[in-house]
Image (cartoon, rainbow, N blue to C red):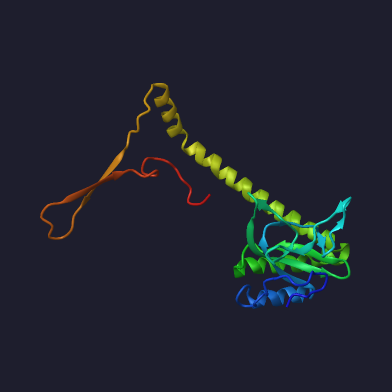
Amino acid sequence: MLPNTLRPRGYRQRELKPGLHVPTGFIGDLKAIDEHLWLVWHPYRVMYDDVMNEYAGLLEDPRHQIHGTDNGLEVWGWVLKHQGYPIPEEKWHIWRLCWPNGWCHICPLQSTDAGYLGLIARRLYLQATTRNRYGDRAWSKKLQDDEEAAFEKDSARTMEMFDAVGQENKWLSDRVRENFERGIVAPSNPQKETIVSYSGQGNRSRIVRPLDDTEGGLVIPDKW
């Protein structure tokens, strides 16, 4: 049960059900690392401070807070919207209760897959010394930096694949450009003919269909 400490009253917050929402073993790992680590459900994408409670701050020094929405949901931060509607997120986040100041954001759970959660638990265990030595803010900043580094690495890998595929398909792009320069713009509609036969068949039939991209010579990776 998520503690009520430094949270508003009277708003709905999804109650974590071990084994249903998140594997029980992962929750045990979190508590073994730090008994003050808790999982909080985020129904919407939000902006949040590193440490939050239900206090909103002064007008000249505003801050994000844990508060309730018009539909009775409890949200942890400023709800982001698109065309006037909240942007759904529907993910669990790890927060740490830092009495008496507030709740410190640790990281979101991008998946509830057991392998991914195991990596998160090991990383939190290794980085717990950072928190003990430098404090909660430093720990949270370290985790955010790791998330950004992983995102940048994945983006770079995707761009490298995109460039490599572009080089492989350059001959086809050159041919299209040459055809346009010559005024050849009508679709060629290349087709593939397949003879269909089976045992005892008197007359063979055929199927004629357009070539797919790879049959036409275009190189497409299995996964971007």
**Along the line of sight, the residue nearer the viewer: 88 or 186:** 88
Count how many numbered circles sit on residues in the image. 0
Q: Quadrant of residue 184?
A: top left
Which residue is at 77% across, 71% downward?
Answer: 37
Which residue is at 80% across, 67% downward?
Answer: 128
Q: Quadrant of the N terminus?
A: bottom right
Which residue is at 39% across, 21% downward?
Answer: 182
**Along the line of sight, the residue nearer the viewer: 66 or 164:** 66
Is 34 on the left-hand or right-hand side of 71?
right
Furthest-front residue in view? 70
Furthest-top residue in view? 182
**Along the line of sight, the residue nearer the viewer: 137 or 42:** 42
Is 194 on the left-hand or right-hand side of 223?
left
Residue 36 pos. (x, y %):
80, 73
Which residue is at 32% across, 37% downward?
Answer: 189
Is 38 on the left-hand or right-hand side of 99?
left
Residue 4 pos. (x, y %):
79, 74
